[in-house]
Image: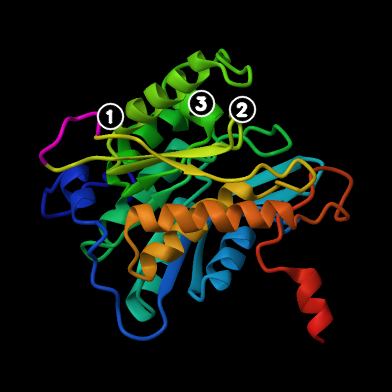
Amino acid sequence: MASDPRPADGSSAEQRASDRGSSHPRSAGTPVALTIAGSDSGGGAGIQADLKAFARCGVHGTSAITAITAQNTVGVSAIHPVPPEIVLAQVRAVVRDIGVDAVKVGMLGTAEMALAVARALDELPPQTPVVVDPVMVAESGARLLDPDAQGALVAEILPRATVLTPNLPEARALAGLEAEQGEAEGDETGEREAEELARAMLALGPRVVVLTGGHRPRAVDLFLARAPSGPPDGGPIVEIPGERHPDGAAHGSGCTHSSVLAAQLALGKTPLQAARVARMLAGEAVAHGLRDIGAGAGPVDVLGLAARRGMA
């Protein structure tokens, strides 16, 4: 079932991805975003973070769960993959009845899951934007993507992506680079490496790359888009600045960023507009992060829970 993700019409992943742009016709009424990702029992990341981010943007959230994790702020103690055919069934059920205006892809875990999700993406209506957050390692350090699955992620998922949102370690891993380079504050080597990595990510197939700045000396996201008639490594890089919040809590920040971006695409924004809003709201979520939750890295707070308690 999941061994052949190519659609019946024979179109390539690149052709399918080219239809998923910023001008997709949003359905009337309440916009809908679908997250295809893992569940975090601690509520900080995964589909729990995604659904909160969708709601923060005024978008109805739906989900297709790829894995169930036993997880808290300290670490991941167990992972149970959902059968790929059930993931595909979840996507089909949502699309058939509710519809979808944008999709966020998070934790895949295995190569078999990547193949099933690729097939699910090929069954989406044309021009549906797809945001891919290459979830590889949890905030606690637990590995969430099998080594064999990384190749499937690159071959099957990234060419189908409208926007790819890696952080610096994820971009290095996808580019085959593990050693850290240029980490000193103001180090020109680090800035050059980040730009080279953004272009290397674009070469893997997505239409747009947003290299997030949370793991860089400057908390600046790098936005790079592929022009239809431009150079293959993209045009000029656009910097999206933001504040760093060392006193905040960051568990789930990557999930929140990519989900806000997907929600903004569901609302009809361009990828650059969506990336700017994602940087702003993800930064606010870290700043308001819940450091009193758990003994480890606390979860981000995209909904402003303290302020909402005061409204009761």
Residues shaded magenta? 229-234
Query: What is the crowding at mark 2: few (fewer than 14 residues within 10 Å), some, or many (at least 20)?
Result: some
Whether 299 is drawn above or below 182: the answer is below
Q: Which residue is mark 1?
A: 203
Q: Main secondary structure of the magenta part?
A: loop
Residue at coordinates 77% horizontally, 48% vertically from top-left? 248
Pointer 2 or 1: first along the chain = 1
Residue at coordinates 22% horizontally, 64% vertically from top-left? 23
Q: Is residue 56 magenta?
A: no
Taking 211 as reference, is 290 left or right? right
Taking 287 as reference, is 65 left or right? left
Q: Which residue is mark 2?
A: 217
Query: What is the crowding at mark 1: few (fewer than 14 residues within 10 Å), some, or many (at least 20)?
Result: some
Pointer 3 or 1: first along the chain = 3
Residue at coordinates 65% horizontally, 50% vertically from top-left? 252
The amino acid on which the numbered mark 1 sits, given as a three-letter code, is Ala
Res. 214 image quadrant: top right
Residue 58 seen in the figure: yes
Q: Which residue is mark 3?
A: 147
Q: Nearer the viewer, residue 69 or 47?
A: 47
Q: Secondary structure at mark 2?
A: loop
Colour mapping: rainbow
Residue at coordinates 40% horizontally, 52% vertically from top-left? 131
Q: Residue 195 in the image: x percent, y percent?
A: 40, 26
Residue 67 seen in the figure: no
Q: Is residue 232 magenta?
A: yes
